[in-house]
Image (cartoon, grey):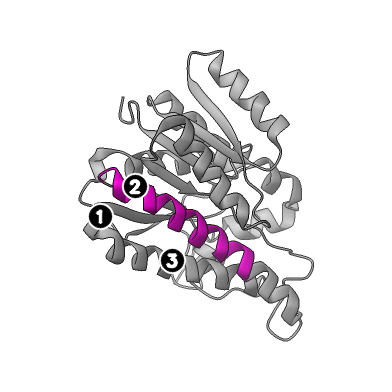
Amino acid sequence: MKLKDKVVLITASTRGIGLAITKSFAKEGAIVYMAARNLELAKQEADKLNSEGLRVKYVYNDASKSESYISMTDEVIKDAGRIDVLVNNFGTSNPGKDLDFSNTDTEVFFDIVNINLRSVFMASKEAAKHMAKNGGGSIINISSVGGLVPDISQIAYGTSKAAINYLTKLIAVHEAKNNIRCNAILPGMTATDAVEKNLTEGFRELFMRHIPFKRMGTPEEIAAAAVYFASDDSAYTTGQILTVSGGFGLATPVYGDLSDKSNRR
């Protein structure tokens, strides 16, 4: 088991990528603390996994309440005595209002940037204090390919993710002296329930043209990358921005238009 007895704290962990990471880590032997606002749902998921002989607990975290980052960390420390791995999985947007530069309200922009960036900064700051006292640890930030290149909308979400990518490198450099690693995973379009429910068939078809693998990623594939960064296999790896997107963004802009045509030139 790659994560045997490691104490792990995962934010936004009751569904999608966060839940997949929770399951993968627990199956690799970790003691996982699910940080969630909906404790009833967290308990349900934890109970399922514990019935399989895994070790999963839950603590309260509300991304809109700064004090909950302190309380969730303190609760894990009180119960387990340490935190070996932190996964910052929280991230939100408002597609109906997070539009292009001209049409996004200033307050909407900063609300999204602030809550996304604060979630990583505060959780990392609290966890790093305890990691330093216990010989080190690993911080994993779940970012997005949306933070790499400008898109036609969701400018606040993209800006927040770009900032998280930079913050990842900054934490990596500043905390190396304490044997704390920090890396980021940038998922592309991933087949979570939320994505599946909100995509029109037309948009799905359009987007798939620009993914060389011609499919969405799975939450489990994102979790596999997180297992690597959490494990001792990555003991000498820090400050890395790992894109897990099936090759999205690698090709020229005309790739999507030409890839399904037999006569390309």
What residue appears at the point 79 percent right and 66 percent down from the top-left corner?
96
Residue 154 found in image quarter = bottom right
Query: Which residue, as the protein is rendered here, is positioned at the far front?
Result: 78
The answer to whether the residues at label 1 and label 3 have Cβ atoms under 8 Å apart is no
Frontmost of labels 1 and 3 is: 1
Q: How far apart are marks 3 and 2 (CA)?
A: 21 Å
Quadrant assignment for the N terminus: top left
Classed neighbour count for the residue bearing mark 3: other residues with Cα under 10 Å, few (<14), some (14–19), many (≥20): many
Pick whichever, 9 or 196, lies toward us. Answer: 9
Q: Which of marks 1 and 3 is nearer the N terminus?
A: 3
What residue appears at the point 53 percent right and 38 percent down from the top-left corner?
75
Name the main secondary structure of what is drawn in magenta. helix
What residue range appears in magenta? 114-135
Residue type of the residue flagged with mark 1: Asn
Residue 258 in view, yes or no: no
Residue 147 in magenta stretch: no
Q: Name the residue under label 2.
A: 131
The answer to whether the residues at label 1 and label 2 have Cβ atoms under 8 Å apart is yes
Query: How far across and down, in percent of the image, does residue 205 sit?
Result: 65, 55
Quadrant assignment for the C terminus: bottom left
Query: How far across and down, in percent of the image, does residue 192 sit?
Result: 63, 42
Query: Which residue, as the protein is rendered here, is positioned at the far bottom?
Result: 102
Q: Name the residue under label 3.
A: 165
Residue type of the residue flagged with mark 2: Met
Q: Residue 178 carries which label?
A: 1
What residue appears at the point 33 percent right and 41 percent down from the top-left corner?
228
